[in-house]
């Protein structure tokens, strides 16, 4: 078998571990899942167990090899102290149903040493542990203690989920079927510019939407009303469009909210909604791509050999502005090419529209998928390559 290339090169896998029978294995998972409070005094439960189920192949392999398994994860942002809102008890209960015998430690972020990558916290984390497995792709772009600390001290490996994530996403950088079309949405243009520039090194066409599109439109001299806008990034957007030429597509129309209107986040929104062209009247806020843009984007996705989608094209939580994201989701699900969705809000949209089954690969990590595509590597992967049992380091 050929040696792995790209981001997977030098990464130890489960079979590279010493015999785990009777040994204590710490598995870093990403169980940062949504919880639901019934509000009637009943127990809080896991609302979506996708990330828990995604870790099962690794946990089941270890159990089948007679290992003693403890999983560890973060949940939410408790800011370095215990917070009952982020207690992992509901996750622990669901894990017990799906993988009996696997223990789950307390929320890693209850200790400030996790995010600070404190060596003392790493020492406590691995105390009594014989080996380590990283199966938390969604957290591997963070140089946190539980991600980068254990491989320096223990025989370590990538779990099945982490390996598959890197295999698929790394393949987008090395051997995508052509044409390769990327659809990138989301709100903050500053968070995505570096990723967009990196993607343009590989894609044939880049389709831009979401709130960040309005800074691009402003850079082109269009009136954007009260739409989301990052004045400090206008020149960057203009340069990117100039460099990309006809390989970048921007919205040609927009669904906008009238002045004084409100968006619906958990409650019905208010105000007049109308479709406008490239220029918006004063006070109107662009919230979704319009019908013409939807048709153009869906047509490009339909003819692609490879599709990568990350970020909603509008505020899909408000049904008045869900049409753009739905159109792209439907196009991706129906595409004949290889389709990859980069986790986060995009995966949530697929679930809302019941289209997940039509996509070839749905990542568990939104931010991590973008970081891998931007840099070609992640801190968690670099740490695994440095483990004592990694290929090329074993003696």
Image (cartoon, grey):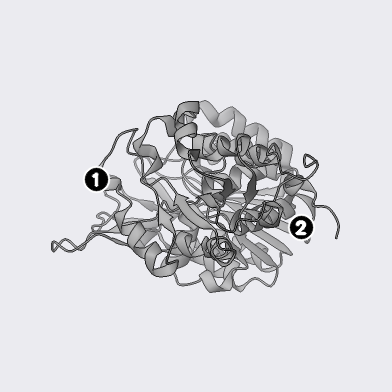
Instruction: Kindly report which numbered mark, 2 or 1, lies closer to the viewer in this rendering.
Output: 1
All told, the count of numbered labels is: 2
Query: On the image, numbered disc 2 is attached to which residue?
Result: 176
- Place residue 358 in its image quadrant: bottom right
> In the displayed structure, does residue 356 sit left or right of residue 96?
right
Report the disc number at residue 27.
none
Residue 211 pos. (x, y %): 46, 45
* Residue located 32% across and 38% down the image: 78
Q: Distance between the Cα atoms at labels 2 and 1?
A: 45 Å
Of labels 2 and 1, earlier in sequence is: 1
The outermost residue toward the front is 22
Residue 18 pos. (x, y %): 67, 51
- Does residue 114 lie above or below 316 as drawn? above
The outermost residue toward the left is 40
Q: SS class of the residue under badge 1?
A: helix
- Does residue 43 lie above or below 143 as drawn? below
* Residue located 59% across and 45% down the image: 370
Q: Mark 2 Cα within 10 Å, few/some/many (few <14, many 20+)?
A: some
Residue 310 pos. (x, y %): 56, 53
Does residue 312 appear in this view? no
Q: Which of the two residues, 363 or 19, is positioned nearer the viewer here?
A: 19
- For the N terminus, give its image quadrant: bottom right
Residue 10 pos. (x, y %): 76, 44
* Residue located 42% across and 39% down the image: 228
> In the displayed structure, does residue 358 sit left or right of residue 300?
left
Query: On the image, numbered disc 1 is attached to which residue?
Result: 84
Q: Which of the two residues, 51 or 14, is positioned nearer the viewer here?
A: 14
Q: Are marks 2 and 1 in contact (CB under 8 Å)?
A: no
């Amino acid at each position: 078998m050929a040696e792995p290339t790209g981001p997977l090169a030098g990464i130890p896998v489960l079979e590279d571990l010493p015999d785990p029978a009777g040994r204590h294995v710490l598995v870093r998972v990403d169980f940062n899942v949504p919880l639901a409070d019934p509000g009637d005094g009943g127990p809080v439960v896991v609302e979506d167990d996708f990330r828990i189920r995604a870790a099962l192949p690794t946990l089941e392999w270890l159990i089948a090899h007679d290992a003693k398994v403890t999983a560890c994860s973060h949940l939410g942002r408790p800011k370095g102290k215990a917070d009952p809102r982020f207690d992992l008890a509901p996750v622990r209960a669901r894990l017990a149903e799906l993988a009996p015998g696997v223990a789950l430690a307390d929320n890693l972020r209850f200790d400030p040493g996790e995010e600070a990558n404190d060596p003392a916290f790493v020492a406590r984390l691995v105390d009594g542990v014989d080996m380590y497995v990283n199966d938390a792709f969604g957290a591997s772009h963070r140089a946190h203690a539980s991600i980068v600390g254990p491989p320096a001290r223990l025989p370590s490996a990538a779990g099945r989920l982490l390996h598959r994530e890197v295999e698929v996403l790394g393949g987008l950088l090395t051997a995508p079927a052509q044409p390769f079309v990327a659809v990138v949405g989301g709100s903050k243009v500053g968070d995505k510019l570096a990723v967009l520039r990196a993607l343009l090194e590989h894609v044939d066409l880049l389709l831009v939407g979401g709130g960040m599109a309005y800074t691009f439109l402003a850079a082109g001299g269009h009136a954007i009303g009260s739409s989301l806008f990052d004045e400090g990034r206008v020149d960057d957007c203009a340069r990117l469009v100039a460099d990309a030429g006809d390989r970048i597509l921007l919205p040609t129309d927009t669904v906008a909210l009238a002045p004084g209107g409100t968006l619906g986040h958990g409650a019905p929104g208010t105000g007049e909604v109308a479709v406008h062209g490239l220029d918006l009247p004063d006070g109107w806020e662009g919230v979704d791509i319009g019908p013409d843009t939807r048709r153009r984007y869906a047509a490009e996705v339909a003819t692609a050999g490879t599709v990568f989608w990350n970020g909603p094209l509008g505020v899909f939580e408000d049904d008045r502005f869900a049409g753009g994201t739905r159109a792209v989701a439907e196009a991706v699900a129906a595409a004949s090419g290889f389709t990859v969705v980069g986790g986060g809000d995009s995966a949530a949209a697929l679930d809302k529209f019941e289209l997940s089954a039509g996509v070839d690969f749905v990542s568990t990590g939104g931010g991590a998928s973008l970081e891998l595509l931007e840099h070609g590597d992640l801190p968690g992967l670099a740490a695994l390559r440095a483990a004592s049992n990694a290929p090329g380091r074993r003696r």
